[in-house]
Image: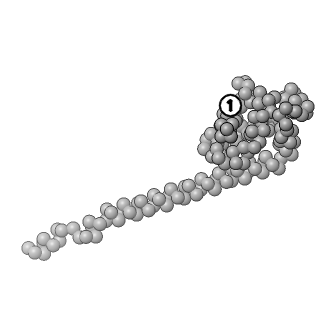
C-alpha cells in the first residue's frame, strides 16, 4: 500500500515542467523579437543606402538638387522654366521624395532617418515657392510629400 501512495504523487520535475516550458517559450519569444528588430533595422539601412545612391549619384537628380539649393528670394530662371514647362526631370525629383514619403508613411523608414538623410533637401523644396506650389496643388498627386514637408517644417521650429 505504501508503494501505491508513492507512485500517485507527482514528482518535483513534473510539477516544474509547466514553468520550464514557460521559461523556454519566453526565451524563444524574446529571441524572436530581437531577431525581428535587428532584421527591421537592417532592412531600413538597405532602403536608406539605395535611396542615398539614387539621390546623390543620379545626374538628373543632382542637376535639380543644385537648382533648388538656391536663395529662395532669387530662384534661378532655369528652375522657373522647368516649373512652367512641367519638366519631367523636376517631376522625377519630386516623385523621388514622394516615394521617400511613402516609405516613411508605411513605416519602412522612420521619420528621424528621413529627416537625417534628406531633411535639408526637403526644407529647400519647401523654401522654393514655385516648387512648393506644385506640391501644394491638390491635382498634382504629392499628398504624401506635402504631409512629409509639413512634418519637416514642424520639427525645425
Residue 128 position in % (x across, y down): 80, 33
- The colour scheme used to paint the residues is one colour
Q: Residue furthest right?
A: 77
**Relative to 82, does residue 37 appear above or below in the rendering?**
below
Closer to us: 5 or 111: 111
Quadrant of image for the C terminus: top right
Extreme-bottom residue of the structure: 3
Residue ID at (36%, 63%): 21
**Residue at 87% from the left image edge and 33% from the top image edge:** 74
Residue 144 in sight here: no
- Total label count? 1
Q: Residue furthest front?
A: 157
Q: Is residue 25 visible?
A: yes
Q: Which residue is the site of mark 1?
A: 143
Residue 118: percent from left, percent from top = 73, 45
Residue that appears at 61% across and 54% down:
41
Q: Is residue 33 left or right of residue 51?
A: left
Q: Is residue 131 left or right of residue 39?
A: right
Q: Position of residue 131 (x, y in %)?
A: 80, 31
Residue 136, by quadrant, is top right
Determine whether, in the image, residue 8 is placed left or right of residue 91.
left
Q: Residue at x 15, y 73 (%)?
A: 6
Instruction: Answer with left or right where residue 26 lies relative to residue 146.
Output: left
Which picture quadrant has residue 39?
Answer: bottom right
The answer to whether residue 26 is above or below residue 104 is below
Q: Secondary structure at mark 1?
A: helix
Residue 99, position in %: x, y? 71, 40
Q: In this orientation, which residue lies closer to the viewer: 37 or 66?
A: 66
Q: Residues within 10 Å of mark 1 (few under 14, many from 20)?
A: some
Q: Quadrant of the N terminus?
A: bottom left
Amino acid at each position: 500500500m505504501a508503494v501505491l501512495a508513492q507512485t500517485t504523487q507527482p514528482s518535483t520535475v513534473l510539477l516544474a515542467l509547466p514553468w520550464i516550458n514557460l521559461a523556454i517559450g519566453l526565451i524563444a519569444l524574446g529571441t524572436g523579437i530581437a531577431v525581428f528588430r535587428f532584421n527591421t533595422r537592417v532592412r531600413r539601412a538597405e532602403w536608406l543606402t539605395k535611396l542615398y545612391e539614387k539621390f546623390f549619384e543620379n545626374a538628373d537628380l543632382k542637376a535639380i538638387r543644385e537648382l533648388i539649393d538656391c536663395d529662395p528670394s532669387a530662384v534661378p530662371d532655369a528652375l522657373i522654366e522647368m516649373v512652367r514647362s512641367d519638366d519631367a526631370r523636376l517631376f522625377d525629383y519630386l516623385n523621388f521624395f514622394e516615394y521617400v514619403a511613402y516609405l516613411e508613411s508605411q513605416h519602412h523608414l522612420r521619420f528621424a532617418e528621413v529627416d537625417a538623410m534628406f531633411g535639408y533637401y526637403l526644407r529647400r523644396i519647401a523654401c522654393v515657392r514655385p516648387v512648393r506650389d506644385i506640391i501644394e496643388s491638390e491635382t498634382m498627386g504629392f499628398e504624401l510629400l506635402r504631409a512629409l514637408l509639413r512634418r519637416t517644417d514642424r520639427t525645425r521650429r
